[in-house]
Image: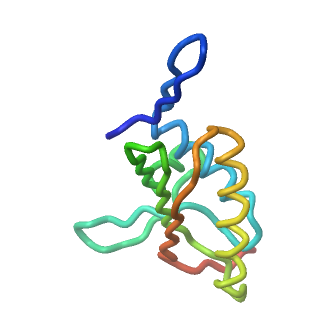
Amino acid sequence: MMKGSMSTDLGIITVSPDVIAKYAGSVAIECFGIVGMAAVNVKDGLVHLLKRESLTRGIKVGISDENILTLNFHVIVSYGVNILSVSDNLMSNVKYKVEEFTGMKVGKINIFVEGVRVID
């Protein structure tokens, strides 16, 4: 997996994709309508809601040679919300906050809605 690197006057800064995924996941679950990140079990096809400490399993981060990020989110949304609105909100929040946090450009955000949950 490629790491993001930036050159400064004092040296090189390298950011691990796991760090970006953890930050992006914490931003995402704060968004309205998002219940949490999802993991799909390949063997039986079941979708599992991930606990807060394993958010990174629901997010894949790609970093190009030009330090442009591609983020893939596997999410579970709240029942009754407008999925397009929730997705737009998630994309704009994550794009803004991840770019501020890393100093890298977010080129693409893909959202895979893996399930719907009724919130008690």
Q: Where is residue 85 in the image (x, y as percent from the top left)?
A: 72, 82
Residue at point 41%, 51% (across, down): 62
Q: Is residue 42 above or below residue 27?
A: below
State the residue in front, 116 or 31: 31
Residue at point 74%, 58% (across, down): 30
State the residue in front, 35 or 12: 12
Residue at point 51%, 63% (across, down): 108
In the visual, does 93 lie left or right of 25?
A: right
Q: On the rendered image, what quadrant is the N terminus found in?
A: top left
Q: Where is residue 82 in the image (x, y as percent from the top left)?
A: 70, 87
In the visual, does 92 lie left or right of 40?
A: right
State the residue in front, 14 or 42: 14
Q: On the rendered image, what quadrant is the C terminus found in?
A: bottom right
Q: Where is residue 32 in the image (x, y as percent from the top left)?
A: 77, 69
Q: Position of residue 78 (x, y in %)?
A: 67, 78
State the residue in front, 61 or 53: 61
